[in-house]
Image (spheres, grey):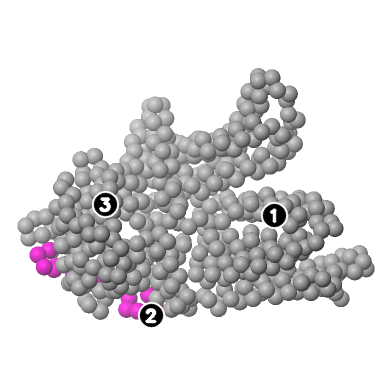
Amino acid sequence: MNTNDPFLSAGDRANPVQRWLAWLPILAGLCVLYVPTLADLFTGPWARDEQMHGPIVLGISLWLLYRNWGAMEAAAEGRQPSAWGWPLVALALLFYALGRSQGVGVFEVGSVIWLLAGLIVVLRGWSALKAQWFALFFMGFMVPLPPQVVDVVTMPMKMAVSYVAEHVLYAFGYPIGRNGVVLQIGQYMLLVADACAGLQTLLTLEALGLLYLNLVRRDSLFRNVGLALLIVPISFTANVIRVMALSLITYHFGNEAGQGFLHGFAGMVLFLSALILIIGFDNLLQFVERLRGQPPAPPPAVLGA
Amino acid sequence: MTIPRRHLLLGGLMAGGAALAQALRPEGSLADVRAPIDLKAMVPPRFADWRELGDVPVQIVDPELQRTIDAIYTQVLTRTYAHADGYRIMLSIAYGKAQTDNLQLHLPEVCYPAQGFKLEHIETFPLALADQTITARRMRTHLGQRFEPVTYWTVVGDHITAGGFDKKLTEMRYGLLERRIPDGMLVRVSSIDRDHRRGHAVQAAFAAAMVAAIDPALRGRFAGLDTATRLALHPTNAP
């Protein structure tokens, strides 16, 4: 299939307009497919608190793709593109058509990952895909999960977060009570709803943690595995912090302030506290490692610097 | 000008994918082409030995929860009925005009624990209604000393669904075959009763009486049209 494909001549390669023109059909195809999807996402799921991380994940994924572009081209140098990409592209497009027409977010948004993988394989081969795998994997975190799954898996977590938030605030002498995931503080009732403490935020933070690991590129297995495992309790703690912040703001400044906070700032608190906890735990693990007498790893390249 | 043929082919394929999605798109909502649902008018306030209690205090729902309910459901009917012998049944019917990922019926096994109830047991069972048997679910729940057995079922379009994956398949069947986004209904019957066997038995009788009292032309919307086929798979475990 790729034997008589006229690749760009040397003259075209030198001409930036020609280079862009060559990519135009693919760019146009991607736009036709995913601009409507993005528009729906931004006015639908991504406009709500529980999936606020969607655009962030998208941005980071695109940046990762861009960052790895050089490495990808280098890896693909002299290798043959593979025809196996075609079925991948076809499958992705079928998933897209089914998902988009029938309103199945997992298929519609998820298809972009398979499609990009297929495109890379068709145009640059498997070694190029290997260079980009993390960016594509990371994109998975922006795919909206089916609501049935979210509801069932999230509930125990919401319960636990509400329980801990209630007990901590009670210990500090606040008049707080709880029924399931409904917190009552003073005269206010707070529902620890989808906006807080869900599976989505757990995934967001897992994504954040993996990104941190990927960027920092520790060569210590102990710290990598340790952090990957610690991300679950970290996300839990970050969620408790968010729910407590929301409760306290509502209690001291009233319902209006709480609602405003909820829609403006709560996600940020979650992200920041998680990030601080991750960096803190990373340093702690480093400290433990040093205590165990191993040579210290090089300092973090991006975030910790 | 040379655009690599492979790039053109890929672009063409992607355009094809977009066109296919457009072609498969449902033309509208099933509810738009059928008789509009008006829960208040369609469910009679009196049937068999049951009558609606008018003087029950309105349930207070906190605003956050109310917003969620408003977003999901087109209509919600909440009533308390009393039997001639005094037994009380709480009926809650939630109707959503469009069942998509973003707008989904919320199931009682999720909602009850969220409100602080302990969910002790949940099972699927064959519920005999007026002229058919459907797959329904029942749960035993309690909040402190409030013991509340629950019976419920869900309808998508005219099909009883067992929830989860089955529901999604039903939705897609409507979308692909009938080119319509189906509507959905959740019918929930509960009572405050320490004896869950009695509670569930009375609830089953209530549900049958209520469905029998609904206009036969509309019954499918409330109780589904597909009958016993699926029930053969579920053993009878009625009390």
Q: Nearer the viewer, residue A93 or A205?
A: A93
Q: Quadrant of residue A170?
A: top left
- Do the residues marked 2 and 3 share a common chain? yes
The three-letter code of the residue at mark 1 reads Leu
Q: Chain of mark 3?
A: B
Task: Give the residues in magenta.
Answer: B31-50
How far from the left and from the top, in percent, is residue B232?
A: 28, 66
- Rounded to the nearest angstrom, the CA distance separating label 3 from label 1 is 47 Å
Q: Which mark is residue B33?
A: 2
Distance in Å between CA atoms under marks 2 and 3: 35 Å
Instruction: Give the amino acid at mark 2.
Output: Val
Q: Residue furthest left?
A: B85
Q: Chain of mark 2?
A: B
Residue at 40% in and 56% down? B68
- Tell me: A209 left or right of A6: left
Q: Is residue A193 above or below residue A106?
A: above
The numbered mark at residue B139 is 3
In front here: A101 or B136? B136
Task: Look at the picture and state if B139 lies above or below B135.
Answer: above
Q: Residue at x 68, y 60 (%)?
A: A117
- Closer to the camera, A142 or B123? B123
Disc 1, SS = helix
Q: Which residue position is annotated with label 1?
A: A62
- Asked if the magenta segment contains residue B45, the reply would be yes
| SS for dot 3 | strand
